[in-house]
Amino acid sequence: MNVVALVTTPTCSARREGVEVNHKRVYRLYNEAALAVRKHKRRKGIAVERQPLELPSAPISLVNGFVMDALANGRRLKTDSGG
């Protein structure tokens, strides 16, 4: 199992302290001060051994038990076909 260490960005740290901040402004200020802005590392999915799909034992029935119809005034009806 791959474990990724959580990296806290300056924006996240400020929000945790209760300060309302804009991440773009923080990035700009860090660049002006020639500081390295720490970014979140993308988490990769956990590598799990894949299992092959099972084939269905019988064909899937595509028969729907309902039939759509329309009245003369345009209203739609859904009726049971009895099957």
Image (cartoon, grey):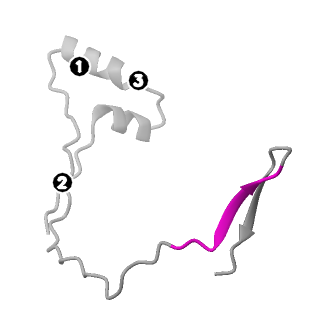
The residues bearing labels 3 and 1 have C-alpha atoms spaced at a distance of 12 Å
Secondary-structure class at tag 2 = loop
Q: Position of residue 59 (x, y in %)?
A: 36, 81
**Amino acid at the residue labelled 1:** Tyr
Q: Position of residue 55 (x, y in %)?
A: 25, 81
Q: Residues within 10 Å of mark 3 (few under 14, many from 20)?
A: few
Q: Which residue is mark 2?
A: 44
The residues bearing labels 1 and 2 have C-alpha atoms spaced at a distance of 27 Å
In front of the other: label 3 or label 2?
2
In the displayed structure image, the side of residue 10 where residue 16 appears, left or right: right
In the displayed structure image, the side of residue 59 where residue 4 appears, left or right: left
Q: Furthest residue to the top?
A: 32
Q: Residues within 10 Å of mark 2 (few under 14, many from 20)?
A: few
Q: Furthest residue to the right?
A: 73
Magenta-span inclusion, residue 46: no
**Amino acid at the residue labelled 2:** Lys
Asked which quadrant contains residue 33, the reply is top left
Magenta-span inclusion, residue 67: yes
Q: Furthest residue to the bottom?
A: 57
Q: Which residue is mark 3?
A: 22
In front of the other: label 1 or label 2?
2
Asked which quadrant contains residue 29, the reply is top left
Q: Which residue is mark 1?
A: 30
Q: Earlier in the sequence, mark 3 or mark 1?
A: 3
